[in-house]
Image (tube, grey):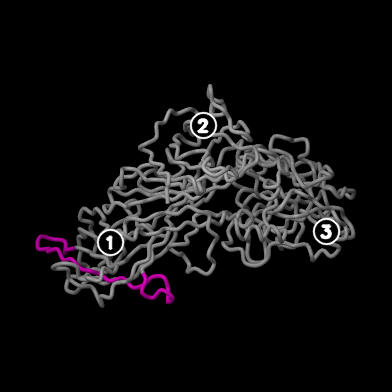
Amino acid sequence: MKKNLLSLSMLAIALITSSCSNDIDDGQTLAAGSSGQAITFKPWANKQLRSATQAKDVTDFAVLATDTTRSTGVGVLIDGALVTGSNASGWTYSPPAFWPETATVNFFAYSPTAAPGVTGGAIALVGQDDANPNEPTIEYEMSALLSDQRDLLVARRSSTFAQDGTGGVLLNFRHALSRVLFEAKSESGMQFIVSSIKLKNVKNKATLDLNAVPKDTEAFPYPTNNATIDTVGYQVHWEPDVASTVVDLEANLTNTTVAGDGQWHYVVADDDALYVIPQENLASDLAKATPVDIGDPDPSSRFYIEITYREDGAGGVNKTYAVPVPAIVGDAYASSIAFEMERQYTFQFELFGKKPIEFKSVKVSAYNEATPQEEPLHLYWAGSNIYWDGAKLTFADSDDKSKEQYMGVFFKWGSLVGISPTEGAWSGITYYPTNPGVDDGWTTDPTKYMTYANIPYAVGSAAPYNRDHAYLTDITNNATTGADTIKALKGDICVYLTKVGAAPKGKRWRMPTSKEFDATEEFYTKSGGFARITTQNATGTTPIPSGWRRNNLNTPYFPASAARGYFVGTMGAYWSSSAADAYQGYDFYFTSTAVHTEWVGSGSRTQGFTVRCVAE
């Protein structure tokens, strides 16, 4: 099959500043259906080891962008361009590409754009040209020496001009490799020097497939060939090169000391971790640690670890052992050593003077992030709560303060059905999508939900249960389960309004996480007397003069819109996208005397609370 190799060494780049990227070059002709707005970027990532202290400091990445509606052979908008800069100063690439007015664009990216030890001196991004330009892969070869390795970050996003045309495409970079650390201890009081550690018989060449593949819920916990790298629910596949041979990955140690105090000591520590292409290997059938004298102690080429060490002192003599490692992925894979994407493996050994080294355990965890965060904190609060404008549910843009006192309609947690805020007997008036996930139609029908219990909401397990996790946003962005979720009228209402064009244009809107209600400074201003307001309209446009304002970002005002069944004007309750447990959601709650940004006590998911959207 013919493919188009997008090698950075072939790019002739004439950089332009992102602040000027909206300009059309002299003689440049825009394609039919183009918006005339240049595509810009706003990348984000977790800690990137041995290339930057924090991955948000990434200085370059390569991008392939394809218009999914264009005809065969002309769908590539950005053909592997090198993008450089920072979020502070802006990102530049050339020539500029322009958003189509309505079509969805697929973005695929990787960073860094060049890495030592890779064939040809650059990581190659490959996209099928004539058959299907929306199927890119990255051909990757890992250097065997730790000092030549670098972390590999990858990102994928599908977006439209309405979502990211103004704020920039949010590329959420994730780690594509596995990390390996080593710890050792000596209980005997003897001190040792470790001079060499090698991972034996691992594959170092593979292809990373960035296609959108649904999550495999039946796969084992961290599947090598079905590893999820983004919260929107797509997966990527590492496919080892069938023609490649196994190699040894070697840590570049310089006589690391292991004290004889019975404590664990890093031999290869956090900043010197080995990187491994995610793969599944057979565990060695060695019965115990075996001295290495001549050749390979395991001619079957199964996985083991080779360690060279000696007693500290003038008479210390180097001893090299082949150490078998038991399977680490559970009973179903009893003979497997599986290295998984974004997983960290810390192998632990005990050293002795008179008997062979002993393997103790392996700790498997996520990458060692100081402050894990999958997306940046939002840049904008919406200018109002979600309300009914007579034709659809919507809300005011961040710079529009004319509707900031609007009460808003109520929602159960994770429901796409807006509930009339009118006090008194339940009227059954709701506002909901006519054909969810299909078109932008809306319906108000007082007989549809005459029974309040029939209004859908997100139920069941929603782990992880923490204030940083945007669970509702995750399930709505999910390309597979999200579609079914939306059809069931469940998900992130802000994401849904963005998708159907009912939200203010040019920003990527979503529900806030619980943490984002108190991400910066405290609420500082209380307005009004917090008196009960007995007359409200059904559309949520009643102005509420009592509430709290924040001194952060764009100083949003939160009216005391209460909750369904409570006294309007006396308190406020706002849903977050974060799950508190399987039955409750985190909410933001306040009265006339205090605000509670981490509230669960009234957070039963069947409660009717208002929603305030945020945007990056």
Asked if the residues shown at circle 3 and circle 2 are in contact, with their CB atoms under 8 angstroms apart, the answer is no
* Side of 119 where 170 appears, left or right: right
Total tally of numbered discs in the picture: 3
Asked if the residues shown at circle 1 and circle 3 are in contact, with their CB atoms under 8 angstroms apart, the answer is no
- Secondary structure found at label 3: loop
Q: Which residue is drawn at 47% across and 33% down?
A: 93
Residue 446 x, y percent position in the rendering: 88, 57
> In this view of the protein, which residue sits in the foreground, 136 or 398?
136
Asked if one can make out residue 212 in the rendered structure from this viewpoint, the answer is yes
Residue type at numbered disc 2: Pro
- Segment colored magenta: 309-336
Q: Name the residue under label 2.
A: 96
- Specify the label residue 565 is tagged with: 3
Residue type at numbered disc 3: Gly
Q: Mark 1 points at which residue?
A: 246
> In this view of the protein, which residue sits in the foreground, 605 or 524?
605
| Quadrant of image for the C terminus | top right
Q: Quadrant of residue 103?
A: top right
